[in-house]
Image: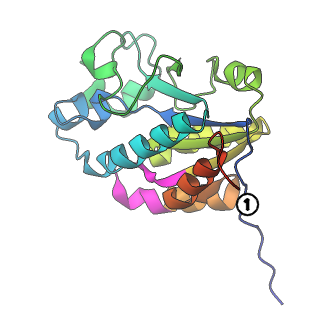
Amino acid sequence: MSTTPYEAPTWRLTPERTALVVIDPQNDFLHADGWYAKSGVDVSHMQRSIEPTRQLVEACHAADVPVIWTRHGSRDHRDAGTFLQLRPFLREGGLRIGTWGYEILDGLGVEERDWIVEKQRLSAFFQTNLEIILRGLNIDTVLICGVLTNQCVAATSKDATFRDFRPIVVEEATGTTFPHLHEPAIEMMRVGWAEVSEIDDILGQLAALRPGAIT
């Protein structure tokens, strides 16, 4: 008799205790004129996340669910750590604070009421104010989307569960530079520490959280 060594979590969105964290939807990652694409990196799988992310953001705003955006970058090689050693094409530029490429892609729906978190390592929790924001908002359930699936999304969702938040990764709203690593990363998160949900289910739950919604 065999025993399944894990149980995939299923967490419903908690009214007034849910937030959306959008990981690094920046020009250098997603735009055709960004540093990644101009350096010859195939960004098409990352770009699959753009429209689902826009839908999530719109639904969260309508439901008064806080939206937190992250931006990854550094001033230069001195504060980027091993990141630039592992990605030689970024040594001369890209993801640099203060540049167009560092900014969030137009059209995703950023509003003044949203939060912006600046990060310099894969996890959006590492030496940032993300946890302070979530605690201050009394959040227990964290929707996560963005790029890259196997890097910053995985690292942030894992750090979320380390802090006893309930991370829910929205599969269609994530992407990576190596598409063959997407599904293994998704499975790793599902088995290890996060719920992985389809966007239609999440959009339905968010609609039910709107003020005046009949549930």
The answer to whether residue 191 is left or right of residue 109 is right
Instruction: Give the image's coloring scheme.
Output: rainbow
Looking at the image, the residue that sits furthest to the right is 1
Looking at the image, the residue that sits furthest to the bottom is 1
Q: Which residue is mark 1?
A: 9
Q: Amino acid at mark 1?
A: Pro
Q: Name the image quarter holding the N terminus.
A: bottom right
List x then y, in percent, for residue 140: 76, 38
| Residue 161 appears in the rendering | yes
List x then y, in percent, for residue 209: 65, 45
* In magenta segment, residue 173: yes
What's the residue at 33%, 15% (across, down)? 96
Q: Secondary structure at mark 1?
A: loop
What's the residue at 63%, 60% (across, down)? 190
Could you say which is closer to the camera, residue 74 or residue 136? 136
Could you say which is closer to the camera, residue 30 or residue 204? 204
* In magenta segment, residue 95: no
Could you say which is closer to the camera, residue 108 or residue 88? 108
List x then y, in percent, for residue 137: 73, 24
- Residue 13 vertical placement versus 80 (above, below): below
Give the image quarter of residue 100: top left
Q: Name the image quarter holding the C terminus.
A: bottom right
List x then y, in percent, for residue 68: 55, 27
What's the residue at 36%, 34% (across, down)? 108
What's the residue at 42%, 10% (across, down)? 78
State the extent of the magenta-drawn residues as a range: 170-183
Give the image quarter of residue 91: top left
Q: How many marks?
A: 1
| Residue 176 appears in the rendering | no
Label 1: few (<14), some (14–19) or many (≥20) C-alpha neighbours in 10 Å: some
